Amino acid sequence: MSSDHHLHQPSDNTETRIAVRNKLSQRIEQQRRKETLNTEAHVRELIREVEGAIVGDDETERRAEELLEELHLYLWHDPNRTETGEETPSPDVLYRFKQIHRRFTNGHDIEASTWFETLVAVAKGLGYVEAFTDLTQYAPVRLETLDGQGQTTTADAPTPIGRRRIGADDAADLEDRAVEITHSSCDHVLTVALPRSGKDSTITSIGMNLWSEHNYSYFSILDDGRMETPMISIPNDEGVIRRNLERMGQEPESFDAEVFVPAMDGIPSKLPANFKPFTIGIDDLTPHLILRLAGITKSDANTEQRIKQALDKTLERTGEVTELVSRLQVYAEEMDATIEWTEKRDSPTGEGAVETKSVQYHMEAEDALNKAAQRLAHLAGEGLIASPSAETNIDMASVIANQEQAAVLCCNFLTQGQEALKYTIMDLWLRLIYKARDQNSRLPRVCLEIRELKNIAPSKLADVRYKETIKTLRQTIFFISTQGGSRRILMLGSTQKLNDVYKPVRSNMATKILLRLGEEEIETLDRSYNFSDEQTRQLSEFDIGQGMILAGGEAYWPIEFRGAPCGLGLGDRHWLDRYGLAWGARVRETDYDGWRSKHGDCAYWVDLAENTVVTDDSIPEVGTWHLLPQDFDADLKPEAIDQAAIDAALERRREYPVKSDLSLEPTGFGDRQRDLSLQQQDRDTTLSEVVERHNIPEAVAPWLSKKAPTREQLVETCRVVADHDDLARQEEIAEHIEWSRSNLATHLRKSESLEKCVTKSDGTYELTPVGKRAAEIKWKVVMEELK
C-alpha cells in the first residue's frame, strides 16, 4: 500500500497480540451478555405462561406442571443462586426452594400454586423480574450528560425524568434502550398534548433536572393569570403525581424560587416572602429595547443613534427618567446636525498634522422618538421604569448567576386596563436575558419554561387580543428560537395543538414530546412525521403522562414521563392556600369546614398573617393561615408563644421540605396609590417646556413654584454641599446659608425640598445625582423664561 493511502487507514493502538486478546475478550463478553439477556427474557415469558396455565387461560398450550418444571430448572442452575448478597433470594426463600427441589428430584407431586409462588420469589431475588404484577422492563429516560468547558452535569448519575417500557419477552439490554434527551447545543423542546394530559408537568419536570443537575438557571416566564407558575415553590400535592413519583423512586420536591412581580399598583399588601417587586432601570435599556417598549419593530440607524445619544446624555447627568423623556422629545424635532471628525495628514516637515473637518445635515422629525418618549413616561408613571438608583431595579445578569433560586415572572397582579402591559414586560425580560447571556458567556446556561406557547407565539394573530403587543413579543420568541441556542438559552414550551404555535418557532424546536392526543392532532402530526400504524395506535391509546419522544429523526415510545416534583396549577384550590399548607400552616379553605365545631373550644389560635395570638371568640376567615394549640410543644400558653415557637411548629407540620421562605410579609405596595391624569395642554403653557429644555429633574421641579427666597436657599444649600466635602453636621451647613439649623432640618426631610438632593454617607453630607443637577441649573435664566 502506498504511503499516501496508508495515512488514511485504521491502526491498532497496542501490540497486535494485545489487540487480538482485547477484541476476543470483548466479543466473548458480549456473547455471554446476550445469552444472559435471552435467558432472563425466557424466564419472564415462562412466568407469564405459568400464570395463564394455572388460571386456565385458553391461549396457554402447555400444562402448568410442564412449565413449572422448566422454570424450576432455569432458576436452579442460575450461577448466582448460591451467592449471598443484597440482591440474592432471602434465606427463607432459598430454604423453600431447596425443599421443593428435593421433592422435584424424587419425583413427588408439588402443589402448583405453592411451587409457582416460590419460583417467582426466587426469580425476583435473582433479578429476573422487579415485580410480579408488572413483568415488563423499564429503561431510563434522562437528560444528556454534559462534560466540557462551560457545560457540566453536576450529578454523578442524572435522575431519570421518565422510563421507557420494554416487553417482558424482549432480550434487549436496558442501557441500550435508554433514551437521552440531547441539550448540549440547547436544543429547544416542545410538548404537545390535550388539556390536563401532563404537558406542563413534563416540561417543568425536565426544567427541574436542567436546573438541579445540569448547571442551568431556570426561568418561568408565562402565567395565564391563574397563579400556576409560582407553584414551583412548593412540593407537588396532587395524589396522581405523587403516585407517579413513587413509581419512579422519587419524592415531591420544590424549587427554591423567587417570584418577581412588577412594582406597580395592584400588588397585595402581603405576599409570601419569596415574592419580590421589581422595576427596570433605564441603564438596562438599549435603543432597541426602548423602541420595543413603544411597539416599534422597524427602525433605521438614525433613530437608534438619536435614542442612544439621549440615553447616554441622561445617564451621564441625572439618570432621571424625566430627563430621558425630555431629551427624546427634543431629539424628535426637526434639527440641523453637525458631525465632526479628525484626519491625520503628512506635512512637509515629516511630522503628522491633524485636520478637523465637519459636515452638516438636516434631521427630519421622528414620530418614533415621540412615541418612545410617551411610552417611557407612561411606564415610569405606572412604576415599571425607574432611574438607575432605584433599589427595586432588577439586575438580570445577577438573576441568571443566582443558580440557587429559580426565577418566576408573575404579572397577575396588574390592575384592570393593564393586561396588555404583561406582554411588554415579558418581552423586556426575554430581551434582557438574551442581552445578559450575549454579553457574558460565563453566565450559566438558561432554561426558559413557557407554558401554552401559543399564547405569546400564535400562528394566527387574528385570534388574540392586543395584536400589536403580541406581534412584537412573538418576534422576540422567534428570535430566541433561532439565536437562543447559540447563546445557550434553551426553551421549553407546551401547547395543545402544534399548528397553534407560530410555524417559524415550532420548526426550530428540535425535540418534540407527544403525550395523549386527539385524532385530529395525530392526523396533523402524521403529515409531517409519517407515523407507522403501530405509532398511530400508541398515540391514540396513551394514558395521562405517557408519550413519545421525536428527536434526531428517531421516535422513542412508549414512555411514562415523571410528573413534576414541584407544584402545578390546580383550578380547584386557591394558590395561596396551597402555599400555606406547604409551609406547614393550617388554612381555612371554605366557610363550610365546621371549624367552630371542631376547634371552637380551643383556648386560642395564632394568626400567621399578623403573627398574633387570638384569644377571643372570633374564628379565622377563609384563607387565613393559622395554628392551633396542639401544634405547639408542651401545651404552650398564649403568652409564651413567640416567633421561634411558631417557626418550630410550622416546620414540624411540613409534609415535605420547602426550600423558599413562604412566610407572609408586607410588600410595602398595598397602600400606595398612583394617579395618572391625561390632559390636553395649551401650546402657550411654558412651565413644562422650560422643565424639559433645562433638564430639570422631576424631584426639584416643584421649586419653580416656591417663593424666590425659599428657592434660592434650596439651591444655595446644594451648592454649599457641592463645594465642601467635610460637612458632618447640619449646623455646619447652616453656617453657610441664611437658614437656621432647625429650618434646614425641616427641608432636608421634605421630598419636595431637599430629601432627594442631599444624603449622608460615611459621616459627611454629599449630593445625590438629583442634587448635583439642581446645583448646576442656571436658575436665573430659568426664572426669566417663566416670566
Image: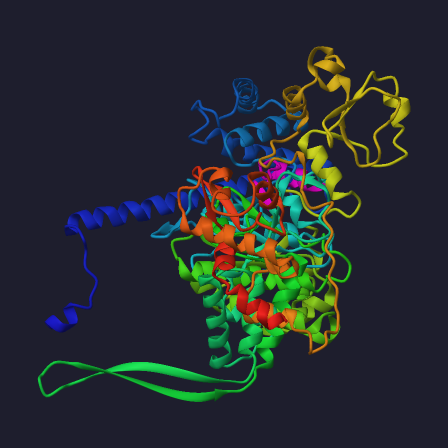
Percent position of residue 43, x then y? 54, 39
Q: What span is colored magenta in the figure? A: 240-258
Taking the magenta stretch, the answer to whether it contains residue 244 is yes
The residue drawn where x is 41% and y is 88% is 360
Quarter assignment of residue 85:
top left
Front residue (pair 550, 331) = 331
Percent position of residue 153, x then y? 42, 46
Taking the magenta stretch, the answer to whether it contains residue 744 is no
Quarter assignment of residue 709:
bottom right
The residue drawn where x is 62% and y is 72% is 689
Q: Farthest residue toward the front? A: 738
The residue drawn where x is 49% and y is 76% is 306
Percent position of residue 515, x then y? 65, 57
Is residue 168 found left or right of 286 in the rendered image?
right
Q: Is residue 1 visible?
A: no
Front residue (pair 203, 363) = 363
The residue drawn where x is 59% and y is 70% is 690
Front residue (pair 574, 88) = 574
Percent position of residue 342, x then y? 28, 81
